[in-house]
Amino acid sequence: MKKFFRIILTLIIIYLTNHSFAFSQSEKIKIGLLAPLSGEYKELGQSLIKSTRMALNDIGTDKIEIYPMDTGIDPNQTLKSANKLKNEGIKIFIGPIFFKSLIYLDEIQDVVFLSLTNKTNDLPKNVISSGINSLSQLNAIKNFLELSEVKKTIFLTPDLDYKNEIKKAIKQSKVKISKLYTYNTEPTKLTKQIEKITNYELRKQNLADEILRVENSDLTDKEEQIKKLEKKYTIGNVNFDSVIISDFDENLKSVITSLIYTDVLPENKFFITLNQWFDESLILEKNIQPLYYPSINKQNLETFNKKFIDEFDTKPNHLSLLSYDLLGLIYYLSLKSDFSNVNDIFKKQNSFKGKIGVFDVENNKINHRLNFYKIDKGEIKEIF
């Protein structure tokens, strides 16, 4: 009789397990999309909505449902919107975009936010940074330095809020840096700092001393040598082979211009910077080339942009490709994981190949394997 009851109990457990599994497989995955749908960044929010719609069409599943909600740029509104969606049964979110919108989200339990920020310091425990972070970029730069057999590299970073992110990424990536300099972005102070870093005054004096030496010499060709020397700006080399500049837009151009002013030229040293999202203005600045940087896959970005424009008759924001891929990542993980406990989904080691490149997921962190590019003579060339 006991054996009979054990058999019946086993059959009941098997039935309930199979029934529960079938239910979880057929259950919809509800994803909240937290984006600015009003205010000055509403066009960015609309771009993210369109990109997730594209992703749904490309995945071709009816298993996923997207629930957009406005955050503006207000952390209080972000918290309110997130709570409203959680009350509707949503446990996983794409967004919010801005780092300052995250500050109250740790008040919400048993949910995960895939924020589009690239900052990784001081995040709430339920927020995962999915942007192109400093570590991902420095991992790619490290690969390039090793590939190019660069011996000595200095690092220049502005005295801005992300400098601590840079310092942390340098340590984590184990990229070999001989010295890290923090500079003031005010033009006059910047120029003075670059002069000091490159020993400009000493190298300039070396040239003046050499011209004087030749003038006072008995060399038969001293007039010719003096003419050659007068075409120079300095004599003597700087104590590095490459320089990494963690800056953007006009500030980046100012730093490079200051280096060139001190007679440190991009054709003689590797000038490397961070992800520039293929800034077209850099292509036009031929005097600062060649310029090297890590980035997402350029061809994939162009293909995505073309498809987006064809479908919506408007150009996407570069974050749209990231939100497109995050939807694909969530769907990919849903096929491999039990979504009943969202806190464990991003802890397991996984790799996912999206349009942006490869996502490496582990311990609630997302890093990207980036490509590496060179702008030279007005053209962008892929190195790896």
Image (cartoon, rainbow, N blue to C red):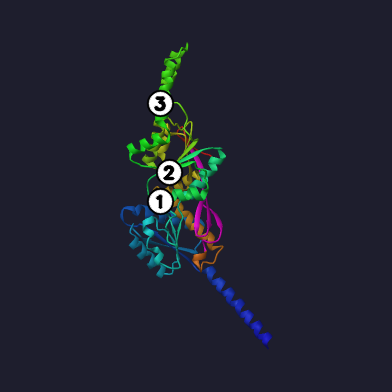
Foreground mark, 1 or 2? 2
Q: Residue 205 carries which label?
A: 3
Cβ atoms at labels 3 and 1 below 8 Å apart: no
Give amino acid for label 3: Gln
Query: Which percent across, then down, holds residue 304?
Result: 47, 48
Q: Which residue is drawn at 45% across and 16% down?
A: 225
Judged from the image, the secondary structure of the residue bearing numbered disc 1 is helix
Amino acid type for the residue under numbered disc 1: Phe
Q: Residue at x 44, y 50 (%)?
A: 165
Residue 360: x and y in percent read 53, 54
Q: Where is residue 230 in the image (x, y as percent from the top left)?
A: 41, 20
Q: Which mark is residue 312?
A: 1
Tally the numbered discs. 3
Residue 196 position by quadrant: top left
Which secondary structure, mark 3?
Answer: helix
Q: Which mark is residue 246?
A: 2
For the C terminus, which image quadrant?
top right
Residue in the foreground of this view, choosing between 371 and 67: 371
Residue bounds of the magenta highlight: 345-374
Q: Does dot 2 land on a helix, a strand or a loop? A: loop
User: Marks 3 and 1, Cα distance to the nearest angstrom?
Assistant: 60 Å
The chief SS type of the magenta part is strand
Most extreme residue toward the top is 220
Residue 371, image x, y percentages: 52, 44
